[in-house]
Amino acid sequence: MPAGRLMLLDTPSLYYRAFFGVPESMKAPDGTPVNAVRGLLDMIARLVDEHRPERLVCCFDADWRPQFRVAAIPSYKAHRVAAQTPEGSVEETPDTLTPQLPVIDAVLDALGLPRAELPGYEADDVIGTLAARDPGPVDVVTGDRDLFQLVDASRDVRILYTAKGIRNLGVFGEDEIAARYGIPGRAYADFAILRGDPSDGLPGVPGIGEKTAAALVSRFGSLAGVLEALDAGVVEGFPAGSRRKLEAGRAYLGPAELVCRVVTDLPVEVDDTLPSEPRDPAELESLAARWNLASPLKRLISAL
């Protein structure tokens, strides 16, 4: 049986935050920027040092815009597509971040930090699966509010939210979700489906904003409860005009469920043991010299 706290890292979310938060003046000897790599390593070091997880997995996007979600709602992340290829959508990525991604892969592999991804799915789905099947406690580290749907007080599944930086993490469990949004703690996905999320290209139900979505989910407990009341002709509890808007937007809700809810039953297998020393010290020393990573690697190895 798993033992001790599991930490699941939304790795793309973290390296994007590192890229924009650490100056590009951080470079390798050949002039290649390594700000995202250095920032990510320092983030992991701080997380391990301050939260002391016994287990950890770096989760990645094997497909940042899965076809099953695009088929359901074509606008899903469409504003972030740089090109379309036979293999799928190419994400718009800053020019100086792209060459750092293989370096991140190589460094994490040399360290021996557990990692997981699955073809056709996002990091969110891998995180959702690993969190759902773990007895807990689980900390999910992300800057993506979509993962608020995973909170579970019964197993101590919580979100360490990076919106204000790694040094000032927001800790969200069911109580914090309820206090912030005025909804049942586990109902964030229901709320987000109704409200929509422009950052992901999800329109929401036309005319249903955040306050109305919160009122509906709070009153009926879930999106399923809202739809059952709608079908039963219930009038009480529906804010003015919301019944008509929901009926008009009904065709959107089924596809939105598929897009917004993370998958929690993927065939992901990973040894989540957090190493106490690097897997390949010689390779790590070589990478440190080539990419100017000696200081952040020293800090991370010390934390481990």
Image (cartoon, rainbow, N blue to C red):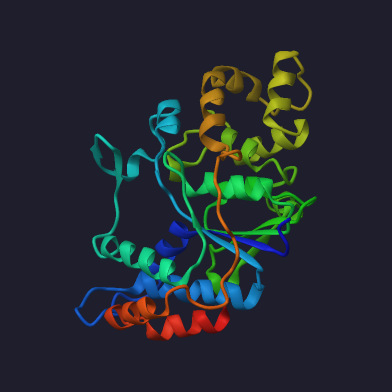
Please, is residue 243 above or below residue 169 in the view?
A: above
Image x and y of residue 178, in percent: 74, 49
Give how far across and how far down residue 112 sits, in percent.
48, 68
Q: Please report the residue visible at 31 percent of the width from the left and 62 percent of the height from the top.
A: 102
Viewer can see residue 209: no
Residue 26 occupies which quadrant of the picture? bottom left
Instruction: Pinpoint residue 161: horizontal percent, then vertical percent.
Output: 59, 61
Which residue is at a point 43% across and 57% down the rendered structure image?
A: 12
Where 302 sits versus 123, above or below?
below
x, y (%) of residue 142?
54, 58
Image quarter in which the C terminus is found: bottom right
* Image side of residue 222 versus residue 165, left or right: right
Q: Residue at x 44, y 46 (%)?
A: 199
Q: Residue at x 42, y 42 (%)?
A: 119
Q: Quadrant of residue 40?
A: bottom left
- Count every numbered label the image shows and give the total: 0
- Is residue 194 or residue 157 the one in the foreground? 157
Can residue 80 be seen from the camera position used here? yes
Q: Image height check: is 244 above or below 198?
A: above
In the image, taking residue 187 as reference, residue 27 lies left or right, namely left
Q: In the shown orientation, is residue 74 left or right of residue 206?
A: left
